[in-house]
Image (cartoon, grey):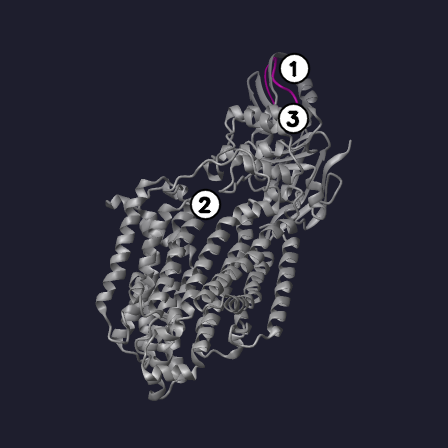
Amino acid sequence: MTEAIQVRGLTKSFGATRALNGLDLSVATGEVHGFLGPNGSGKSTTIRILLGLLRADGGSVELLGGDPWRESAQLHRRLAYVPGDVTMWPNLSGGEAIDLLGRLRGGLDERRRKDLLDRFDLDPTKKGRAYSKGNRQKVAIVAALSSNVELLVLDEPTAGLDPLMEESFREVIRAERQQGRTVLLSSHILAEVEALCQRVSIIRLGKTVETGTLAELRHLTRTSIIAELAGSPNGLAELPSVHNLRVDGSQVSFDVDTAALDESLAALTKVGVRSLVSQPPTLEELFLRHYAAGDGDRG
Amino acid sequence: MSRAGLLGTGQLVRLALRRDRVSLPCWIVVLSVLPPMMGSTYTELYPSVAERAALTDTLGANPSIALLYGPAFDLSSPGGFVAWRIGGFGAVLIALFAIFTVTRHTRAEEDSGRAELLGSTVLGRYAMLTAALIVAGGASLLIGVLQALGLIGIGEPVAGSLALGFGMASAGLVFAGLAAISVQLATYARSANSLAATVVAVAFVLRGVGDATADVPWLSWLSPIGWTQQLRPFAGERWWVFALPVGCAVLFGLIGYLLLPRRDLAAGLLPERAGPARAGGALTGSLGLAWRLQRGSLIGWLVAMMLGGAIMGALADGIGQLLGDSPQVRQIMRQLGGQQAMVDAFLATVAGVFGLLAAMYGVQAALRMRAEEATLRLEPLLATKLSRLRWAAGHLVFAFFGTAVVLLAAGFAMGLAHGFRSADIGGGLTDVLAGSLVQLPASWLLVGLAVVLFGALPHFATAAWGLVAVAILLSLFGPVLRLPQLIVDASPFTHVPKLPGAEITATPLVWLTALVALALGVGLTAFRRRDLA
């Protein structure tokens, strides 16, 4: 599988602030890749470096097989970008902005443009400032998706969209995925990430802390177990994979590293299980663990 | 207006002072020290009583000088000289300061969306406007007081010093009041500033024409810029004239307060129309976009400069006969080289002013690049196949060719009008056009320096206005302040041949143009290599 984006050991400082601290990111061609991290963790900085708007201090960056700083204009023919913070020209209508960006990208697909305007219920005749935040976001999304490109770079594209539009957005991205388009999707909306992304990278403090498929990541987290046993539990407390063990007579509850589920269940069945409730980790828990400060060393 | 409407004004005043902690003191210091500095050099320049006595007749009789600086009532004392020399331009500067300050703390805050955030707190409806007026008006009064104290400090009469200082301050008040109206009418901070600055320009021209002509002196009385001088500081003060600016300031302010509740936040009184659903064929690249963003200001400047040029050109031919008719004046005129020389000097002086104005146009056109970058509108553009240099080229076409167009249009209009009046269209046109054309390298150099700042120090790009201000001050006041030649030479306009009248010397034009090319190269290279910021 070829890589659309290949970043290794990326560093970037703004004065004394270190924004990126050895970040790694690899996005395979044809995949929708979730890019997650708490506010200020360096997601937008990474995206700006990928677009050649900022210059990397160190590390290697490859975008669509090229150097995003030196070959930015050539590479940009093959990608489309939705910024996280969309501002519009006050004296240009939304339709004009869409056309301008499309033409600058090397042409836009008229049918898709019309279809997207309908789908997102966007009035293209309003002038820049008359749009609400959500509608400005829609202008940027329509502009990006109207062109036929290999790579979509989306920086929190649905911030400000209503649930209906959010659903439209998911449909469109699913269709893009079917067509083999590569998408880098930075987002805080976990349901969106879960619905769209095959793989995710989680960054914190300018560093990648986790990357993999959602299934792999789930595997790295803990499952909650509540069990009614035949006798008192034996040897559970000694298992390193068991956390937060609580024993109340014959009832036990604990969290267990999902990868090591086997050994804890074996310990339970030795005593005899009357009932068992197992709760798989939610994505929220997964992210909260990585987002919360100081958790990096525990994980 | 109840007290609730003003709730939070104090906090906003503190916020404004915090935001302007660098620029506000700069304005105050520069405007405050000019009069006493000029008064001191006067004493050095004209030590004897005889020399001073002759000034009023010589300088005061020259209409081209009257047009620029205003009527000379009594130039035999340092105070009287300062009041004449600085009254008009000082009032223009303080007027612009007041306008920019009021807009910055009202309309610009609405544009950025910060006003919404502030408005959601416990804040009266009129608090923002009031705070802006307090800051602009307070700073104007402070400038006036400091000017008066400075003049008293160098030994000038108290009455005249107070009249000049408060005359200037009252010009600030009038235009702060005007800005209170313009920020209600316009849809954007930029258009509010242009609207009010246009009124300043019109006021300056009214005063200039009124002062330089014998037939319509009442025109000066229509101009708030002229009132400071009509107070006649150091020349038998006419205190009643204060009623004009103070009454005008109050009236303008009241209109502003009345209009304020009649519009929505972030909207002007003039409604915004819907735009086209599709982009026209011209909007395809950086030049097309730059045209859309810059055409309004280019057309506005073009019209204003051509009007100004036509007025000045029409006045030029009569300039020798207009002011004073004493034998003394006639003798001075002969000394100055006769009427033709005076007309030439007038045309050359006006061409120099056009050069400065064209530089202002060019600098604001170049700084559009910074505005586009700072508002994040540049990012999506550069995420397309558009390269940085191509994007910049679109705006630079306006910054450089636009400057040339504006300057030559002014020269053309002035030459044509002068040619008509002097019944020599061909001769008038070529002379005057040449006089404007030679200004171009100097105007461009300021634009080039703005590009350098944008490329190398984007966060300080607006310092380009500081360079423009320095060039203006050196051109207008450098000779009078007797600054060392080294400092006067720092302004590119010092090196431009004064045409018509003087010999054309190509050398300064060549090296000025070379410097322009260098600045452009440095600025663009720096921009290409830096992070977007």
Report the amino acid beneath label 3: Arg
Report the amino acid beneath label 2: Ser
Q: Horizontal and vertical percent for residue B367?
A: 53, 55
- Point out the residue furthest to the top here: A274
Q: Horizontal and vertical percent for residue B65?
A: 40, 73
Q: Horizontal and vertical percent for residue B159?
A: 25, 74
Which chain does the numbered disc 3 sit on? A
Which residue position holds label 1?
Answer: A271
Residue B354 visible from this viewpoint: yes
Whether the magenta-drawn stretch holds residue B449 is answered as no
Q: Residue at 47% across / 39% down in the picture?
A: A129
For the record, the magenta segment spans A217-239
Horizontal side of residue B48 vs A181, given as left or right:
left
Residue A49, picture quadrant:
top right
How busy is the neighbourhood of tag 3: few (under 14 within 10 Å), some, or many (20 plus)? many
Report the amino acid beneath label 1: Val
B218 and B246: which one is in front?
B218
